[in-house]
Amino acid sequence: MLRRIWVSLTSWLPGRRRAVEELLVQLSGNQARQRWEAAEALAPYSGQAQVAEALVEALGDAHPFVRWQAGQSLAQRKDERTYSLLESALASRNLYRRGAAADVLGQLGDKRAAAVLSRTLDSRNAEIRCSAAEALARLADPETLPALLKALGDSDEHVRRAAAAAVGAIGGPQAIAALLTALQDTSAPVRASAAMALGKVADPETVVSLQHALGDSDPAVRWHAVRALGVVGDEASVPMLRPLSNDQAVVFGGSVAQAAQEAIQEIEARCKKQARAGRTL
């Protein structure tokens, strides 16, 4: 019995090595689809040094799907080798690789990455700064708040948008004050991100500003403000939300009107619950 198992293993292991070698060749091939499929198939072997290095190299691929899949395969390995390779990739001359490495570091959730990602916010490349801010949103480390507050003043609107989300993930008085300012940004995506972040912070002090955002010219800002008020709004918010029950602008597959109706229901249910709780005291 043991001999049969041994014979089986000795025939299987070389076959697996050959399969990995073939996938590594495919990962550097000419066809983007094949490279994408190879990056996905290599995920179970990403603990091997050669495979991990090849996947980090693929983070610099010209095709976004290949970069994304290589990142997903690497994100499954929360080990020291993967972290070290990704940290080194942040200094790569390949801008794609640097941005993708920042994204994967955020997915790993390793707090050690917070400091290096904060420094990456000073990159001369806006896409890399944006990737770093998005990664920091996943980490939500309070130590990164000063760097993210600075990023809210970035010249690039995509960086400011990502920074607003990251600041909201951290929360706290400083974050709220900065998000209220971002709610007045000249860029609609930044204002929408700020409104969404304020909904996650869920502080009653933000209600008035969110009510004002209901009149924003951009439907995405109105939609996020409506949803935020559904979380934190009070009875005074209901009359301001009712006109938006006829706002048929579509955002993320749903209308502002639908979001407004749901927010009103949430506020009214919350107010009734609070009233009942008050009567029992």
Image (cartoon, rainbow, N blue to C red):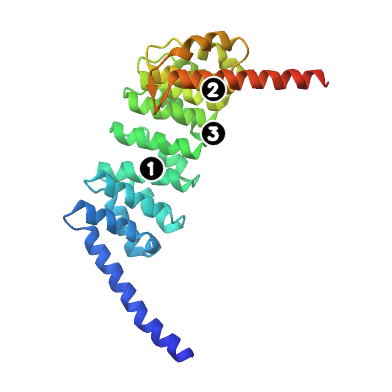
Q: Secondary structure at mark 2?
A: helix
Examine the image and state in which quarter residue 230 appears: top right
Residue 103 image label: 1
Q: Secondary structure at mark 1?
A: helix
| Circle 3 residues within 10 Å: few <14, some 14–19, many ≥20 | some
Q: Secondary structure at mark 3?
A: helix
Q: Mark 1 or mark 2, which is nearer the start of the sequence?
A: 1
* Viewer-nearest residue: 41 or 140: 41
Residue matched to label 3: 142
Task: Give the image location of residue 31, x and y in percent.
Answer: 18, 54
Q: Mark 3 or mark 1, which is nearer the start of the sequence?
A: 1
The disc labelled 3 sits on which kind of residue? Pro
Q: Does residue 63 lie above or below 227 as drawn? A: below
Mark 2 → mark 1, Cα distance in angstroms: 33 Å
At 28% from the left and 33% from the top, the residue drawn is 125
Q: Nearer the viewer, mark 1 or mark 3?
A: 1
* Viewer-nearest residue: 105 or 219: 219
Residue 262 image label: 2
The disc labelled 1 sits on which kind of residue? Asp
Task: Give the image location of residue 18, x and y in percent.
Answer: 28, 73
Residue 41 image label: none
Task: Give the image location of residue 238, x and y in percent.
Answer: 57, 12
Q: Quadrant of the C terminus?
A: top right
The disc labelled 2 sits on which kind of residue? Glu
| Circle 2 residues within 10 Å: few <14, some 14–19, many ≥20 | some
| Circle 1 residues within 10 Å: few <14, some 14–19, many ≥20 | many
Examine the image and state in which quarter residue 215 appears: top left
Q: Mark 3 or mark 2, which is nearer the start of the sequence?
A: 3
